Image (cartoon, coloured by chain):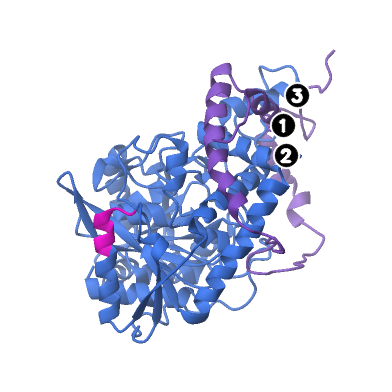
Chain colours: A blue, B purple
Amino acid sequence: MTNIGHTIKSVKQGLEKGEFSVEEIAAEYRKRIEKENPKLNAYLSVFENQNPKPLTLNPGPLSGIPCAIKDNILINGEKCTAGSKILKNYVAPYDATVINKLKNAGAIFLGKTNLDEFAMGTTGENSAFGPTLNPHDHTRVAGGSSSGSGAAVAADLAVFALGSDTGGSIRAPASFCGVVGLKPTYGVVSRYGLIAMASSFDQIGPITKTVEDAAIILNTIAGRDPLDFTSVPGDVPDYTANLGKPIKGLKIGVPKEFMGEGLDSKINDLVQKALSGLESLGAHIDEISLPMTDYALAAYYIIVPAEISANLARYDGIKYGYSTFEKDKRLLDVYLDSRAGGLGDEVKRRIMLGTYTLSAGYYDAYYLRAQKVRALIKRDFEKIFEKYDAVVGPTMSTVAPKIGELSDPLSAYMADIYTVQVNIVGLPAISVPCGFVEVGGVKMPAGLQIIGKHFDESKILQIAYAFEQSRGL
Amino acid sequence: MSNITEKEVEHIAGLARIKLTEKEKDKMTKELGAILGYIDKLKEVNTEGVEPIAHITGLTDVFRNDDNPRESDPENIKRLLKQAPGEKDGYVKVKSVFED
C-alpha cells in the first residue's frame, strides 16, 4: 500500500498528455471497484456509465476526475441511503450544492460510499449494509462515519471522495486508512443536500491522497449558498495559495490532554517524531492545555443527540422511506413500527438520549448546561489562538480497531476524544498521515491532526503540506 | 452510573415514537444509564454567568426571499409524491388518527 495511485494532478497530466481519455480513466476505476469492492464494502452503489456519456466534458478545474460521494449527500435521481434501512430505496429528488459545484467543475461520480447509519459512528460498523473493511488489514475497521470514502481513497477506488464530519467522521477514517481528511470551518461549505445529523456541527469536506488535492477540492466546494443560511458570506480564498510557503516562525501548541493517558504509546512516538519534524522546519512548538477536553466529549454527547432527536423526527414512515403503512391500521402504529423497523441500534440510542435530555425537567441540567460548556470551550480556543497559529496532536488515540472491538457504545464514544472539540467550536482541522504502527505483522497508518482558528484553512493546509513534503508521500 | 428506570425509557420511547421490544427496553435502560453516568460529569463545570452558544461563528439574522420556486413545480410534486408509501389525489395519504 505504498503506491497511493492517482491524484488530481496525475489524472490531469495523463489526460493532457493523451495517456488515457476520460472514458478510459473512469472505466479503469470502475474495473478496480468491481474487483476490490466485494472485499472492502466501500461503495454502496456504483454508477454504471452514468457519466461520462459521449463527453461534452466541462472544462472545469476537476475535469474528468473520478470521485466518490458519501451516501448521505444527495445526487439527483440516485439512491441516497445514509447507510440506513429506512432510506434503503430513497431516491434523491435534487442535487446537494456541493454536487452541483463538483458537476460544474467537471468531476465524474463513480458512486456512493458506505457510512455509519446517518453518520453516527467512529468505526463504520453501524452501517445497515455492513462495515467497510480497512484496506490495510481486512480484519480491521476503516473508521467512521465516512468509512467508504476513507477506504475508497486509500485503496485508490477513487481519486478523491467527499465525506461529512460531525465529531470526527472525516478525520477518523483518514487517520485509520492513511489518507488526508479535511473538516472545514462550520459554514464554509454548504450543507444543502447533506442528510442532517446534528445541524450545528455537520460539515462536508474532502478525503484525498494529498494535501494539495484537499485544497483543490475545498476551492471547488466552498462558498456562501443562499440555500444554506448557516453558510458564511464573503469571497472564497484560493486555498492552494499558501502551499509550499515556509512554516518557519509559526507557533504551534500541543495540548497535553491529547498526549497523555489513553494515547497508544506507538502513536505517541509518531506524533513526537512529527513534532520534531515541524520544529526542524522552523516551527515553534509549545505544550498547551485544553482543560475542558473531558467535558467536551460529555457536552458533545448531549448536544449532538439532542439535535439528532429533532432532525430524525422526519423519518416517520409517512412521506418517504421504509414504512409499515400497508400493514398498520392506526397512524401512531405507522410511526412506531416504521421507526422501530427502519432505524438501527445506535440511531435509536441517540434519538432516545436526545429526547431524554431535551424532555421536561432535564433541559436545563443537560442541554442548556452543555451549550454553556460549549461557550467555555470556545473561549479556551480563542485564548490559544491569540498566541498560536495552530494546535497539533494525534487524530485518533489508536490505529484502526479490529471489527467488533468497540461494540460497547460508551467506549466507541470515547474514541472521539481528540476530534469532537473541533466541531463543538466549529473550527477547521485536517488529518494528515504521519507514519505507520506495526501491529500483528501489519503496518497500520496513523494521522496527525492540525487544528486552526475559524476560517484559517489556508494555514493548516500550509502546515500539513510542509509536513507531508518533508516526510515524502 | 446515573439512574434511568425502565419506566422512563418506555416514556421516552413513546415521545420519540420508537417501539421497543422488552429485550430492547432492558438493553436501552442499561446503555443509557452508562452514557448518562458519563455525561453527568458536566455538573462539575462552573457555568455561572456563561451565555450559552447560539451560533458558533456568530452569524445572526440571515434572511431569504419569501418564495420557493420548487414549491409550485408540478413535476417536482409528482416526484416527491411517488416516494410516499400512500398517495391519493395529489396528497400524501395517512392512516386514521382515531379508532373506529
Query: Three-letter amino acid code at disc 3?
Result: Leu
Q: The disc labelled 1 sits on which kind of residue?
A: Leu
- Residue that appears at 67% across and 38% down: A355
Q: Are marks 3 and 2 on the same chain?
A: yes
3D distance between C-alphas at marks 1 and 3 = 15 Å
Quadrant of res A325: top right
- Main SS of the magenta part reads helix
A227 w.r.t. B43: above or below: below
Chain letter for the residue marked with disc 3 in the picture: A
Q: Amino acid at mark 2?
A: Ser
- How far apart are labels 1 and 2 at the CA level? 9 Å
> Spatial distance from mark 3 to mark 2, Cα to Cα?
23 Å
Q: Are marks 1 and 2 in contact (CB under 8 Å)?
A: yes
Disc 2 is placed on an element classified as loop
What is the x, y in percent for residue A348? 57, 33
Task: Give the side of residue A452 with respect to residue A10, left or right.
Answer: right
> Mark 3 Cα within 10 Å, few/some/many (few <14, many 20+)?
some
Q: Which residue is mark 1?
A: B15
**For this rendering, which residue is in front, A84 or A355?**
A355
What residue is shown at x 34% (from left), y 46% (from top)?
A: A142
Region rendered in magenta: A263-270
* Residue to which mark 3 is pinned: A331
In this picture, is B81 found above or below A240? Answer: above
Looking at the image, is mark 1 or mark 2 nearer the viewer? 2
In this rendered view, identify the residue nearer to me: A30 or A290.
A290
Which one is in front, A318 or B33? B33
Q: Is residue A95 left or right of residue A396?
A: right
Relative vertical location of residue A209 with respect to residue B13 in this rendering, above or below: below
- Residue that mark 2 sits on: A359
Q: Is residue A443 magenta?
A: no
The circle drawn on residue A167 is none
Which of the pair A189/A160 is nearer the observer?
A: A189
